[in-house]
Image: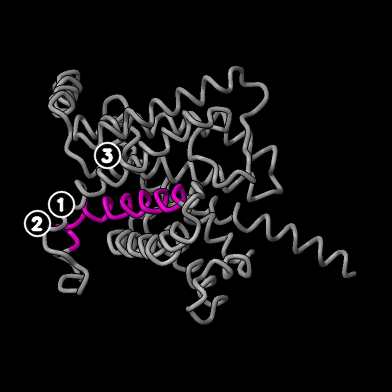
Amino acid sequence: MSAAVLFFWIRLTVLWPYTAGAVVLVVGLAAVSRKQVREEPGLERFVPLGPVLFAIPMAIFSGDHFVAARAVGGIVPSWMPWHLFWAYFVGTALMAAALSIAARKESQLAAALLGIMLFLFVLMIHIPACFATPFDASRLTIALRDSALSAGAFSFAAVQAEEWQRGAYRGWGFALGSAAWKRIPGIARVVIGVALTYFGIQHLRFPSFAPGFPQEGPGVVVAMPSWIPAHVFWGYLTGAIMIGCGIALLMNWRPRAAANVLAAMVLVLVVFVYVPLTIKNASNIALGLNYLAIHFALAGDALLLASALPKGIAEEVAVPAARKASLEQIPPA
């Protein structure tokens, strides 16, 4: 009897993160504007998918907080009481934010609060860890990762700032003025640009690791699927693209295009590397689903930033021209 209960619990701990991610995927796809996807040219078609791609991993990580609450509670700073409470609280907050952002219901508030929470993780957990172990590159990787995700969440909130300030949340203490919200995409561009440049350099240093987000530590090595040839080549190529996109964001040279290129590259990695990896490690969340989730987060992060940045001249001309051409093809009544 006890063995059957233990088996059921193990299966439940694996099933819950998958279920949370699947629910948010369905909710998010239902809220995507298919008309906007069809009308946008080239890589711009992916931009409306940014919120759902960003929300899915938050739901998966929410599931992690519930099924591994004691392990998550161990990350909470020692000076804070009630470690287990904070593990469950953050899990609940992640799921609430994921559903809100995916469904586009009160998503401005949810994105802003999520950005604040992720930034607090950087200040309270990751930066002290970097000082405690200054020669551990994985600590800096995680700090830059959560900084970039926080910047993406704030970018999504900034896109809708005018609507937000006209609504029920006008006058709240953290509701910035319109001028301040307009500066946030520029700050996010720099934060994400710095992170990407560092990640790209790490790929050039360790090209044999699976491409995408750098490994979190030397003890966790995620290799590319064996059927993909020339592993080192793909590591170098990923690093070069990340550095190029990072520098473009830092220099403010066609930053929206750079963000879209980054998102497209990560989605290719998701299809060919991280979906097969997740299938192979279906019962091992840490070495399977979580790596798929964090790359969904990176793609969504790039698309949320892109949505907050101005389009280039070519794109601004191309969209009205395409719409005009489509209207000219409609026969008169």
**Residue underneath mark 3:** 306
Residue 162 occupies quadrant: bottom left
Q: Which residue ends up furthest to the left in the rendered image?
A: 179
* Crowd around label 2: few <14 · some 14–19 · many ≥20 (10 Å): few
What residue sits 21% from the left and 70% below the top? 169
Cα–Cα span, label 3 and label 1: 14 Å
| Main secondary structure of the magenta stretch | helix
Q: Which residue is mark 1?
A: 183
Amino acid type, callout 2: Ala
Residue pictured at 39% horizontal, 60% vertical: 122
State whether residue 30 appears in this view.
Answer: no
**Colour mode?**
one colour
* Spatial separation of the CA atoms under disc 2 and disc 1: 7 Å
Image-quadrant location for residue 154: bottom left
Q: Hey, what amino acid is under mark 3? A: Ala
- Specify whether 277 is left or right of 99: right
Q: What residue do we see at 29% from left, 36% from top?
A: 35
User: Front-most of 243 and 17?
Assistant: 243
